[in-house]
Image: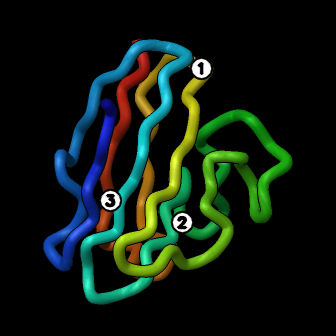
Amino acid sequence: GNVVTYTDSGYSPSTLTVKKGETVTFKNQSSQSMWTASGKHPTHLLYPTTGGCIGSTFDACSGVQLGAPWSFKFDISGTWKYHNHLNPGDTGTVVVE
């Protein structure tokens, strides 16, 4: 499936291409919590579906612990940047075709 792994080095792969309507699972394999959310920090408004905890629905809304997955279904085509809200320097991109 479509899996992005978060480690102490950041998100891998840094860019993942999926088809519209597919789900991406973000897995935390790092030593810290992973709060994956749409760019830009801290508003999370780039992914245009609102109603999430901060801005977009593309937002885990809390820190995900080691070994725990968090998934999001991408229904809108485009290039969507994201980051770890708890460590905003760690970023990635999902391209939805």
Give x and y (percent) for residue 85: 51, 73
* Image-based side of 48 in relation to 87, left or right: right
Q: Nearer the viewer, mark 2 or mark 1?
A: 1
Front-most of 19 and 83?
19
Q: CA distance from mark 2 to mark 1?
A: 20 Å
- Of pointers 3 and 1, the one earlier in the residue sequence: 1
Q: Earlier in the sequence, mark 2 or mark 3?
A: 2
- Most foreground residue, 62 or 55: 62
Q: In the figure, residue 96 lies in which quadrant?
A: top left
How many numbered circles does the render carry?
3
Which disc number belongs to residue 76? 1
The image quadrant that residue 53 belongs to is bottom right
Other-residue count near label 2 (Cα within 10 Å), few / some / many at <14 / 14–19 / ≥20: some
- Between circles 2 and 3, the one closer to the viewer is 3
- CA gap between label 3 and label 1 equals 20 Å
Q: Callout 1: helix, strand or loop? A: loop
- What is the secondary structure assignment of the residue under circle 2? loop
28 or 44, nearer to the observer: 28
Question: Is the residue 78 above or below the residue 28 in the image?
Answer: above
User: At label 3, which amino acid type do we have?
Assistant: Thr
Disc 1 marks which amino acid? Ile
In the image, what residue type sits under mark 2?
Answer: His
- The residue to which callout 2 is attached is 41
What crowding class fits label 3: few (fewer than 14 Cα within 10 Å), some (14-19), or many (20 or more)?
many
In the displayed structure, does residue 8 sit left or right of residue 60? left
Q: What x and y, as percent, mark residue 91?
A: 32, 59
Labels 2 and 1 touching (C-beta < 8 A): no
Choose the circle earlier in sequence order: 2 or 1. Answer: 2
Residue linked to disc 3:
91
Q: Where 76 falls versus 85 (above or below)?
A: above
